[in-house]
Image (spheres, rainbow, N blue to C red):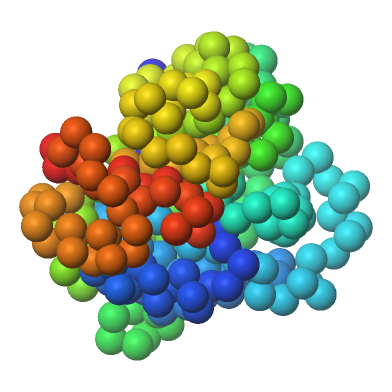
């Protein structure tokens, strides 16, 4: 079974600064929301997938007792920010997180119990609606700083996706491939194949990443997500803003290096 992207988690120290930067780049960003466990986010909604800008907004709500749990979403992202900003997590679409957890275990992944949570969200009209999620994590010892999980939306999609949030001045359409820079790239590729992720995760050694995109950057990780592709309908709609923010051109794409954009490389291209 080939899985599709639900969203990517971009961990930032300053959520307001990230929201402002994404808005300058021509994205429509949803209002800020808070989780019940100390993190907060704002989203860039695309067609059936989204970019999550995530930060720790209330560290006192991150209970150290969570350390007794097999995996803690807030502790993981808090600790991730202690060593770098960047793409901390990849979420895949799911209709049944419990069933997917079983499949992950068969594939040999270390899988904690499914994590359920709810929060409030704002509609474009300013109304408050409830959204709820079930997450099943497929952990791998080589990917301690690059966690993958499935995300099941438990409330109707009408509570989450709104056309007004999915329309962007820069012509953004979708997330393409996700790139991992890893010293054990071959083993990482094998892992993703085992859990049914084909064609959307590209694991490379650092020198391969530099050779492909022509960007050498000290902010690239050596054992985690390096960045992602943003698919747009017209490069002209985003090129000026991206260039002003430090993007460079390479083989028809615009590359925002991680040192210029909150620790994550954004590869902007058309279909």
101 vs 229, nearest the viewer: 229
85 vs 187, nearest the viewer: 85
Specify the farthest residue to the bottom: 126
From this view, report whether residue 144 is shown above or below residue 208. Answer: below
Residue 258, image x, y percentages:
47, 50
Q: Quick check: 55 left or right of 76?
A: left
Seen at 28% across and 86% down, the residue is 125
Residue 180, image x, y percentages:
50, 31
From this view, report whether residue 18 is shown above or below residue 6. Answer: below
Q: Quick check: 110 left or right of 222?
A: right
Seen at 34% across and 33% down, the residue is 213
- Can residue 73 be seen? no
From this view, report whether residue 88 is shown above or below residue 165. Answer: above
154 vs 7, nearest the viewer: 7
- Can residue 124 be seen? yes
Seen at 85% across and 64% down, the residue is 63
Residue 197, image x, y percentages:
43, 23
Seen at 16% across and 68% down, the residue is 169
Say which quadrant the C terminus sits in: top left
Q: Which image quadrant for residue 231? A: top left
From this view, report whether residue 130 is shown above or below residue 186. Answer: below
Say which quadrant the N terminus sits in: top left
Residue 157, image x, y percentages:
33, 58
**Count of residue discs:** 0
Q: Quick check: 159 left or right of 181?
A: left
Q: Which image quadrant for residue 139? A: top right
Q: Which image quadrant for residue 104? A: top right
Q: Quick check: 58 left or right of 146?
A: right
114 vs 72, nearest the viewer: 72
């Amino acid at each position: 079974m080939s899985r599709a992207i639900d969203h990517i988690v971009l961990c930032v120290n300053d959520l307001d600064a990230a929201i402002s930067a994404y808005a300058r780049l021509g994205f429509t960003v949803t209002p800020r929301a808070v989780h019940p466990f100390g993190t907060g986010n704002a989203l860039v909604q695309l067609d059936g997938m989204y970019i999550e800008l995530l930060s720790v907004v209330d560290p006192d709500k991150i209970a150290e007792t969570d350390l007794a749990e097999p995996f803690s979403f807030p502790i993981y992202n808090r600790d991730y920010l202690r060593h770098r900003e960047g793409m901390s997590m990849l979420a895949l679409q799911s209709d049944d997180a419990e069933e997917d957890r079983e499949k992950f275990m068969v594939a040999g992944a270390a899988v904690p119990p499914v994590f359920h949570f709810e929060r409030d969200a704002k509609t474009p009209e300013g109304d408050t609606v409830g959204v709820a999620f079930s997450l099943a994590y497929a952990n791998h010892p080589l990917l301690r700083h690059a966690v993958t999980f499935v995300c099941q939306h438990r409330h109707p999609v009408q509570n989450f996706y709104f056309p007004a949030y999915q329309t962007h001045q820069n012509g953004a359409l979708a997330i393409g491939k996700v790139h991992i820079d890893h010293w054990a790239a071959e083993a990482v590729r094998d892992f993703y194949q085992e859990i049914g992720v084909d064609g959307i995760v590209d694991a490379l050694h650092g020198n391969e990443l530099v050779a492909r995109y022509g960007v050498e950057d000290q902010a690239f990780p050596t054992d985690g997500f390096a960045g992602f592709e943003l698919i747009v309908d017209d490069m002209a709609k985003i090129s000026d803003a991206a260039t002003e923010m430090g993007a460079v051109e390479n083989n028809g794409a615009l590359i925002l290096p991680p040192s210029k954009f909150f620790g994550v490389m954004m590869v902007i291209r058309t279909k």
